[in-house]
Amino acid sequence: MDWAPDDTQAIQLLPGDAPRPAPANAAGPSIFTALQEQLGLKLESQKAPVEVLIAERVEKPSEN
C-alpha cells in the first residue's frame, strides 16, 4: 500500500538516532485515501466501550 504520513504520523525512529520528522517532500495519498482506493476499505469513527488493563506494579520473577 502506498501512502504518505501526515504531520501526526511523520516520525521516523532509526537505531541510535533521536526521533526526527519524516521528509516534507513525501508524496502520496493520506492513509485514509490509500485504504479506500487501494484496498477498498473505509474507516469510520465510532465510540465503543474498551477494556483497559492497568498494571500498578511490575517485579522481576525470583530465580527459584
Image (cartoon, rainbow, N blue to C red):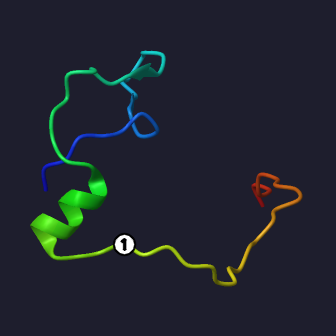
Q: Position of residue 3 (x, y in %)?
A: 19, 47
Q: Which residue is at a point 40% across and 22% down the rendered structure image?
A: 21
Q: Is residue 7 left or right of residue 57?
A: left
Helix, strand or loop under label 1: loop
Mark 1, residue position: 43
Q: Is residue 16 left or right of residue 51?
A: left
**Quick one: 27 or 20, which is closer to the camera?**
27
Q: Which residue is at a point 29% across and 75% down the rendered structure image?
A: 42
Q: Is residue 26 left or right of residue 20?
A: left
Q: Quadrant of the C terminus?
A: bottom right
Mark 1 is surrounded, within 10 Å at the Cα level, by few (under 14), some (14 to 19) or many (20 or more) other residues, namely few
Q: Position of residue 20 (x, y in %)?
A: 42, 19
Q: Which residue is at a point 42% across and 16% down the rendered structure image?
A: 16
Q: Quadrant of residue 50?
A: bottom right
As drawn, 42 above or below 28: below
Q: Quadrant of the N terminus?
A: bottom left
